Image (cartoon, rainbow, N blue to C red):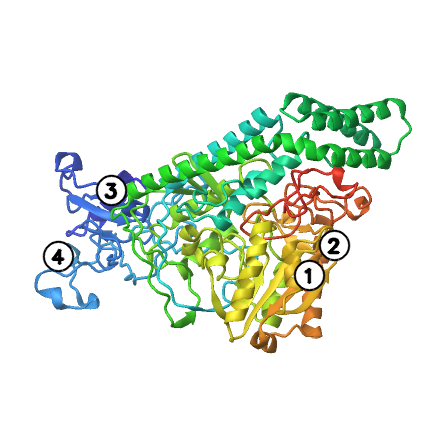
Amino acid sequence: MSNDSQGSVKGEAAMILSPSGSASSQGPPLSPSTTSKPPELPDELVQAGWAKCWSRRENRPYYFNRFTNQSLWEVPVLGQHDVISDPLGLNAAPAEGGDSNLGNGQRKRRSSEEQVAGPNSVKRAKVEPTTPISPSTPGVKPWSAAPEDKQAPPPTPTTPSPAPAPYRPAVIYWDLDIQTNAVIREHRPASHLPPHPEIEMQRAQLVTKLRQHYHELCHQREGIDPPRESFNRWLLERKVIDKGHDPLLPSDCDPIISPSMFREVMNDIPIRLSRIKYKEEARKLLFKYAEAAKKMIDSRNASPESRKVVKWNAEDTMSWLRRDHSASKEDYMDRLEHLRQQCGPHVAAVAKDSVEGICSKIYQLSADYSRRLRQTHLSLLQDPPTEACASPQQSRLVYCYPVRLVIPSPPLPRVELHFENDVACLRFRGEMVKVNRGHFSKLELLYRYSCIDDPRFEKFLSRVWCLLKRYQEMFGSGANEGTGLQGALPVTVFEALNRQFGVSFECFASPLNCYFKQFCSAFPDIDGFFGSRGPFLSFSPVSGSFEANPPFCEELMDTMVTHFEELLNQSSEPLSFIVFVPEWRDPVTPALTRMEASRFLRHQLSVTAYEHEYRSGSQHICKRDEMYYRAVHGTAVLFLQNDAGFAKWAPTPERLAELTAAYRPASSRTSSLSSPGPAHIAPADRDSAPKASDRMQSDVMSPGGHDNNNNNSNNNNSSSSSSSSSSSSSPRDKMAAV
């Protein structure tokens, strides 16, 4: 609401409540422009709803809050607002003179208000102090709104209006009332730099620039497009071992060469293999591979033996293609697999140095961007942090609590909010992020439960903008990119886990897709304000029951199992981890092998492919009919528990039966279980689709970790069907490569 409109409305109120009981006959009051201009309001006060207005009755400026209808003569101070202080007479006026020792209910009214009730005067009930209205409540002025959505003017003494009702989501995919049973040892606040929209915008620009460099290097050096989602998987794989300061950009990793990125680029050389469905496609792919292998070995510095082997096999394949036109699809696939086995090692040998150069260059650029970003971030802080030695871990046991930052947050710039139907749009300097109103309401609740430094929501919109921007940076901005990075279990499964096994905590989640209000996530610096307990690999519970649906990254899953073993070994209190991983057996993943051989394994459950579903990772923005997708491979559910945990949450047949029943797709959703974006494979297409155990195929979404990506783990010894699938995406990828 503009200052002019405020002044106009309040001026009318002043005329109605003039001392004579009628409209004031005085001349027009002195204009604000003819007096000394009061100081401008800082951004944090403007974001909290304060505006500077002009009182025609008192002929001086005042300050009005459009969120709470408070008004003050003096410049407001954050956290010290008194709704009784009301220069317009809407509430009881502040005490004057000798009445300063009276209570709020005994304060005298101004002399201008001690009057006989005139025909135009209205007696207004005293407004009691209330909790602040959060930005998600309808009624907040949007930065741009359609004419029919414009807000009504603020209530005047003659036009009282009721408070708007809070928004209630039609469908809820969470239960934030469940209290935690996770006990940890008390620890000191984290030393992460507090989030800031300016820094987040710069980080997004640098990540986009880094993605472009990766794309250009793949084209220039290898003549291929970068493998689908490989950059996102690289970010995840690097953060498992990164010791740098930036929450997203890797900057301190050993080794420098990423196994994930190296493996994925190598698997696309000399050409990217695609999923084959028809005989003609197999014939063309075989010819292209032979031609590309021969061209590559001629243009690189290869040994004479390598040149001889590759050329002979390529020419033999082309000769076979020219003379045999009656071969079947299986014949072409067998020939392609044979060619890859013969030529693959020689092609990889000549490309090894070049691909390592790509991985090294991307890492060095990321480290440089991280250093520059941190310097800019430190310059925005009022009190730059100093390096302090880590204090010893406290021995007191407490229930787990959200991440707290030791560095106070600086004043945050204003973020604009408006609603387009059921979508909340937040804009900062032309950069807009979106979230549906249901999840916006969820973020508000999480913020209320978890944030302790912003009780009046002055920084809420800025932090929501940073949160949405951060996950957008990690997932990428391409069509359907990253939609599988936050796949979650169905609500019915979470309900069964909580009811039967006491689960109240998610080991891999985010504020956008969590079911409980207590969870671990990738970004403690921003997620902590919304309930995150930090990264799981840094989280050390003593007792509790946990659900773990990790991203399908080789390095992360292996480190996760190691962390499980350490926690279960160290604690004698009840401790339980229920782990959900894809059941791939050709070849089996090392993490699954280790868990199956663990002495803490109490039970293992297999859920059949196509007979269970998962919740989309883009649930915070996708349509309701795209919320669930069918899993095209089996899921292994493993119960890792120490003795006390097994005694308390034993996987009995009755409990397992309820969990299995909860995993079955709801009949009302069977017709809409496709992934939001990447298409799923219907049961009728199983014959034409590669096996679920195929390590080189992921043309459909597979369920997995919530807030992180998963890694590719291709193998040169795959079956003949795997040779026709895309090497840029493995079954560990949670999104389709269609």
Q: Which residue is mark 1?
A: 663
Which residue does the image show at 62% across and 28% down from the upper left? 224
Amino acid tagged 4:
Ser
Give the CA distance from mark 3 to mark 2: 66 Å
Local secondary structure at mark 1: helix
Q: Is residue 167 visible?
A: no
Furthest residue toward left:
98
Foreground mark, 3 or 2? 2
Give the CA distance from mark 1 to mark 3: 60 Å
Q: Which residue is mark 3?
A: 7
Q: Which residue is mark 2?
A: 609
Measuring from the top left, give residue 35's x and y in whole percent: 12, 37
Q: Is residue 596 above or below residue 201?
A: below
Residue 111 is marked as: 4
Mark found first going from the N terminus, 4 or 2: 4
Give the CA distance from mark 4 to mark 1: 71 Å
Q: Is residue 548 visible?
A: yes
